[in-house]
Amino acid sequence: MIDKIEILNKISKIEDPDLGKNLADLNSIKEVTIENNTIKVYIELVQPIFTIYEEITRKINDAITSLYPTIEVEVNIAERMYDLSKRKVLKQVKNIIAVASGKGGVGKSSIAANLTAALSLTGAKVGILDGDVYGPSQPTMFGLDEQPFQVVEMPDGTTMAYPLEKYGIKVASMGMILQKNEAAIVRGPLLAGYFSMLFEQLEWGELDYLVFDLPPGTGDVQLTLTQKIPLTGAIVVTTPQEIAVADVRRSIAMFRKVNVEILGVVENMSYFIPPDLPDKKYYIFGEGGGKRVSEELGVDFLGEVPFEILTRESNDSGIPVVFREEAENQRKIFLDLVRKINKKIRQRNYKILQIPAMKISL
Ligand SMILES: Nc1ncnc2c1ncn2[C@@H]1O[C@H](COP(=O)(O)OP(=O)(O)O)[C@@H](O)[C@H]1O
Ligand SMILES: [Mg+2]
């Protein structure tokens, strides 16, 4: 005889690795059914679940088969999410991540492209929005140069515009609205209006993540964008140099001013390992700047990304390096960043879910 109570007790104790609470505390177990030789478990976890799906499934499997070794186990995980319908824009986008830097050239766009690519490797639906008006890089990084948006005329005469798509990732930039030299002429409010089209009028569809490659700097443009777009959190990119690190302070101050959570700091171009001397590691731009500034400002340090010839080549040739077969090392680095970022996002989403849960008495 299969004892459902015993199963429930056992799986209740499994911990959500990101939230540090067990499935009972999280009220995650929705149903356990027993049909012939199969136990079906239905649970609900705070989204995004991509980086914990496998671990939780395996733990539930192990817990049940330790009690009943010959039984079949089927685990169904649904996402728990707060209501997005009251948003003014991007109502179908679950998580919006801004990638920012105090100054240009630190590799913000490269990090944004590869984070987006790594997120898609976890099975999530993702898009990237390039906010750099004067020098959009994402079309190049995704090999989409010079292509305009796809505009479709609907039967009722209205038109719908869609982002472009590459490697299963949706991509949009100002360059897709304006001609190459137009951006330099169109300024001020008009430019802001064009830019708003990218998130107000473009049909992004349902996405798990939208990565927003913010223009470099901490001026009015950046401030307005961070207020207009319902950001889940921000990632600040820096190089190890003291001079770049000073800009991190400004970036973080800007996000704090508008109450956007800092997911953490990523240090790019941290070191160089010559391909023909794999035992050597050169800290060309100094060592540990990103980590030090993170500690100083009380934000998470997410990791170091090396300076690499393959990465530079990939950026120029339109394929994010994490998609390259030979880039095992970069893939590992970016998937590790994604795991840490997801942990922060899930903790935030859990907190938001808690508040209405306390108020609603349904
Ligand atoms: N980790 C890296 N290794 C090698 N080249 C990189 C790396 N990160 C960025 N780059 C290169 O450095 C230049 C600037 O990067 P980019 O992402 O455009 O910076 P930003 O968006 O901060 O201005 C680009 O040519 C890019 O390909
Ligand atoms: Mg850039």
Image: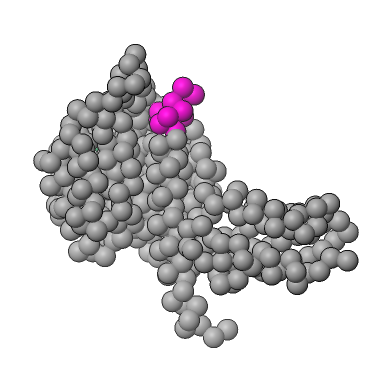
- Residue 195 lies, with reference to residue 167, above or below; the image says below
- Point out residue 3 in the picture as x, y percentages from the top left corner: 81, 69
Looking at the image, what colour scheme do you see?
one colour
* Residue 94 left/right relative to 70: left
Residue for point 64% across, 67% down:
12
User: Is 325 included in the stretch rendered in magenta?
Assistant: yes
Residue for point 24% across, 58% down:
298
- Point out residue 129 in the picture as x, y percentages from the top left corner: 35, 44
- Residue 308 lies, with reference to residue 225, above or below; the image says above
Q: Quadrant of the C terminus?
A: bottom right
**Is residue 267 visible to us here?**
yes
Q: In this rendered view, identify the residue nearer to me: 159 or 56.
A: 56
Residue for point 26% across, 34% down:
270
* Residue 191 left/right relative to 52: left
- Residue 253 lies, with reference to residue 239, above or below; the image says below
Q: In this rendered view, identify the residue nearer to me: 234 or 140.
A: 234
What's the magenta region?
320-331
Residue for point 54% across, 60% down:
16
* Residue 1 left/right relative to 358: right
Q: Residue furthest top?
A: 276
* Residue 168 left/right relative to 100: right
Q: Quadrant of the N terminus?
A: bottom right
Q: In this rendered view, identify the residue nearer to me: 292 or 198.
A: 292
- Point out residue 253 in the picture as x, y percentages from the top left corner: 18, 58
**Is residue 216 visible to us here?**
no
User: Is 197 included in the stretch rendered in magenta?
Assistant: no
- Point out residue 311 in the picture as x, y percentages from the top left corner: 34, 26
All told, the count of numbered labels is: 0
